[in-house]
Amino acid sequence: MTAATTPRPTVLVGLIGTGIAPSLSPALHEREGARHGIGYVYRTIEVSPREVDEGGLGPLIVAARRLGYDGLNITHPAKQRVIPLLDALAPSAEAVGAVNTVVFEDGRAIGHNTDATGFGRAMDDALAGAARDEVVLVGAGGAGAAVARALVDRGVGTLAVVDADEARAAALAAQVGARAAAPPELPRLLASADGLVNATPLGMADHPGSAVDPALLDPRMFVADIVYRPVETALLIAARARGCRVMPGTGMAMHQAADAFEIFTGEAADRRAMLADLEDLVAQEAA
């Protein structure tokens, strides 16, 4: 007789959101699962904004639990709407007021936010030692809220939140102890800023352009972008040309996924390998 082999674990995860068919998350998570010998299955679950508005999110969460999902990633437009449907929030989600990761654990659904932790880890990697007395954040949406929390947690002295929606900027600024500003104030704010972060969709392949006039960039400042498709956005290209220290969006995207992977599996993610995977997937997409 041969000794029985220990069954390898299986993990079933889903992504709920709108327009998620092109997501790189399934491949990124499944590649990392394979490195750990895990039968890792990651499925996309498309929902329309109307379904979310009309209460369709709750039945999906219940169904996922009954079908044996270990967890879910949550993206637009459900990051806030999912909160009342959960049993508890981790400190990361409480701090941001949004959930992008749900784990089903001991009969409970617990919400986490790895957008904030992912951006923070990316800063640690790319911007260690960079001055951060004054930082300007452009974009006060869901991603901006996570980035703002990470910036405050990383010791930014004065944070200015800029958004075309002044009420949204004011609400986020009040939440994190920052100051709100309108886009016309950018020249004055950037004249003394140590750093600039773009948390808007501008720079994405289907939203070309830059959230900031490149003429306002100065070599003394760091420039970070959360957009990673493409990796080299118009903003980062201009910042490099002006001698700024830059942080592309791939770092946040990788760490966000790695943090979620660790929550789902209890295994330590190979972050260097996951970054290489992400860069490979983005390159394949662009080819």
Image (cartoon, rainbow, N blue to C red):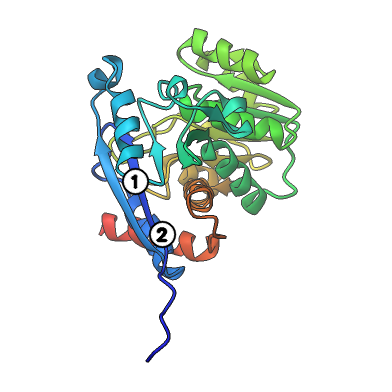
Q: Residue at x 55, y 41 (%)?
A: 224
Q: Residue at x 49, y 66 (%)?
A: 273
| Residue 216 occupies quadrant | top right
Does label 1 or label 2 sit earlier along the sequence? Answer: 1
Q: Residues within 10 Å of mark 2 (few under 14, many from 20)?
A: some
Q: Which residue is label 2 attached to?
A: 279
Image quarter hosting the C terminus: bottom left
For residue 243, say whether it is visible: no
| 21, 269: nearer the viewer | 269
Q: Which residue is label 1 attached to?
A: 68
| Residue 219 occupies quadrant | top right
User: Residue 267, percent across and down?
Assistant: 54, 59
Q: Secondary structure at mark 1?
A: loop
Above or below, 238 relative to 139 = below
| 218, 167: nearer the viewer | 167
| 190, 16: nearer the viewer | 16
Q: Is residue 85 left or right of residue 132?
A: left
| 141, 197: nearer the viewer | 141
Above or below, 83 relative to 181 = below
For residue 210, say whether it is visible: yes
Callout 1 amino acid: Gly
| Residue 193 occupies quadrant | top right
Residue at the outermost top position:
167
User: Residue 16, percent across and down?
Assistant: 32, 35
Q: Are marks 1 and 2 in contact (CB under 8 Å)?
A: no
Q: Residue at x 51, y 34 (%)?
A: 110
Q: Residue at x 39, y 32 (%)?
A: 202
